């Protein structure tokens, strides 16, 4: 079997970072931090990233490079080679289902970002106050037609890239757009530092107050660690299968984690000062960045330009993530004998339809609740907080127990030094126990 490889370690890092950095960092991290009590939540989240996210990221890349197949097949092949049950491939199946559902609502939010490119460019935010910005956002949510339209446009953008094969465009996009996004976030932090809310915002984000920690905050933090690193659905297995044999997996994984975390913390630092300076509610929910950043753009010099650029870059960041979210379903349909283009369309149409549910949950179906959650909330909760961690648990158990130490040591190439032992101990005991404890804690 001939199998292509990334042109370089940089190319792999860029693709993986392109998948990891997305709405999760700029949209979701700030709003769940606002809802779950600020600094204490950030601390729990960082612990989840370091103790659970990083070892699992390493495990996924390792499985992919050793298996040299799609997620489901890499798992079943390696399992067979180690004398374990090929049913381990089922872990990959759960992950694929997660990607399917996440993409449906992710595309709706990406549609908001896309529509804000035009709002910002029209100069609508210049000099606008909090009420006006909020009214514009509410008007977007209240319109089923606009939400469905932007969601449709975004799905089409994703389909066009995935149908043509991912790599060429992706590498180029990520190389320029990610540094651009980081730069704009730094500019926004610079603006935030000039507002009277800066000290409050920074305190909120970085000074843990455990009395403020929300009830299911630990589960939310765990789920987000998976969401933001694109773990728990085999993306990193698929990308890892293209990694050249010489590259250090651990070093690459650490780079990805650091870049992803820096972007999220920058976004938080840009947003919360604006929240406090304008007397807004940190726990405003999914609309948080759409209600705060326009205020910053409206008040800063050349704000229309920066605002437009920002939402363009956010759209691209979301785009490189939706591409990676569509890929597992398409790959699976291809393995079932479909050609690339029909496979892409067959995957995208039902995802698009499910996305309608997410879009309508903000207006027509805003009163509908299932298990005490609105429909959008339900899709997000079930995927991020249940499916991703469960798949991650499967990956950890596989890498720690089914895969022999000789295999994982050889693939990681860390020798018998402390680095390998640390990872191996973590993936065998700490990671699975932590995931299970968090689950039980939230069930009881
Ligand atoms: N990581 C992306 C973000 O933070 C979302 C994403 C892309 C994702 N691919 C994924 C999440 C795979 C889980 C699994 O926005």
Image (cartoon, grey):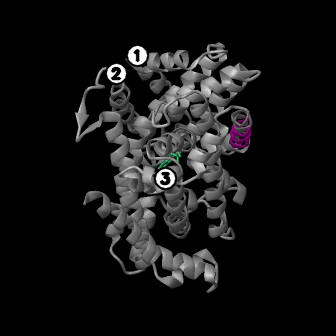
Q: Residue furthest left?
A: 371
If the image is split into quadrants, where does the C terminus sit?
bottom left
Q: Look at the numbered discs 1 and 2 and tell me whether their residues touch, using CB distance below 8 Å.
A: yes
Label 3 Cα crowd, 10 Å radius (few <14 / some 14-19 / many 20+)? many
Residue 107 numbered tag: none
Q: Is mark 3 within 8 Å of ligand 1?
A: no
Which residue is the site of mark 3?
41
Assign the N terminus to one quadrant of the image: bottom right
| Residue name at image x 66 percent, y 20 percent | 298
In front: 246, or 313? 313
Mark 1 CB within 8 Å of ligand 1: no
Residue 387 vertical placement versus 245 (above, below):
above
Horizontally, residue 23 falls left or right of residue 170, namely left
Mark linked to residue 363: 2
Where is residue 402, by image quadrant? bottom left
Q: Residue furthest right?
A: 301
Q: Position of residue 147 (x, y in %)?
A: 43, 22
Which residue is at the front of the view, 138 or 274? 274
In the rendered image, is residue 47 in sight?
A: yes
Where is residue 66 shown, x and y percent of the image? 54, 70
């Amino acid at each position: 079997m001939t199998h292509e490889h990334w042109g370089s370690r940089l190319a792999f890092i860029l693709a993986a970072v392109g998948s990891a950095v997305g709405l999760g960092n700029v949209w979701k991290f700030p709003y769940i931090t606002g809802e779950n009590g600020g600094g204490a939540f950030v601390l729990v989240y960082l612990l989840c990233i370091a103790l659970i996210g990083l070892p699992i990221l390493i495990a996924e890349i390792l499985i992919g490079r050793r298996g040299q197949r799609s997620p489901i097949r890499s798992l079943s092949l390696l399992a067979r080679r180690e004398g374990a049950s090929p049913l381990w491939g089922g872990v990959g199946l759960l992950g694929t289902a997660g990607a399917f559902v996440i993409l449906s609502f992710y595309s709706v939010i990406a549609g908001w970002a896309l529509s804000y490119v035009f709002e910002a460019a029209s100069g609508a935010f210049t000099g606008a106050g909090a009420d006006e910005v909020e009214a514009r956002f509410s008007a977007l949510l209240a319109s089923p037609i606009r939400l469905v339209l932007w969601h449709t446009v975004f799905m089409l953008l994703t389909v066009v890239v995935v149908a043509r094969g991912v790599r060429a465009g992706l590498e180029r996009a990520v190389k320029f757009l990610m540094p651009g996004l980081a730069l704009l976030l730094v500019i926004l932090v610079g603006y935030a530092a000039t507002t009277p809310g800066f000290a409050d915002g920074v305190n909120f984000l970085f000074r843990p107050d455990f009395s403020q920690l929300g009830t299911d905050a630990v589960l939310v933090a765990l789920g987000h660690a998976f969401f933001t690193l694109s773990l728990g659905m085999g993306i990193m297995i698929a990308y890892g299968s293209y990694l050249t044999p010489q590259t250090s997996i651990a070093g690459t994984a650490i780079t990805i984690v650091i870049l992803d975390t820096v972007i999220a913390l920058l976004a938080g630092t840009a947003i919360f000062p604006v929240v406090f300076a304008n007397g807004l509610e940190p726990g405003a929910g999914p609309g948080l960045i759409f209600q705060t950043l326009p205020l910053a753009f409206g008040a800063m010099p050349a704000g229309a330009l920066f605002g437009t650029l920002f939402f363009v870059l956010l759209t691209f960041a979301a785009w490189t993530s939706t591409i990676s979210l569509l890929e597992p379903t398409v790959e699976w349909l291809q393995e079932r004998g479909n050609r690339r283009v029909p496979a892409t369309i067959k995957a995208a149409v039902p995802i698009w339809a499910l996305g309608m549910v997410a879009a309508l949950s903000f207006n027509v179906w805003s009163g509908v609740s299932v298990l005490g959650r609105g429909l959008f909330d339900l899709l997000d909760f079930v995927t991020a907080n249940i499916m991703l961690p469960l798949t991650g648990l499967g990956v950890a158990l596989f890498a720690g127990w089914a895969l022999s130490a000789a295999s994982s040591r050889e693939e990681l190439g860390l020798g018998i030094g402390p680095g390998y032992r640390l990872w191996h101990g973590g993936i065998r005991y700490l990671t699975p126990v932590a995931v299970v404890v968090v689950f039980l804690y939230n069930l009881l």
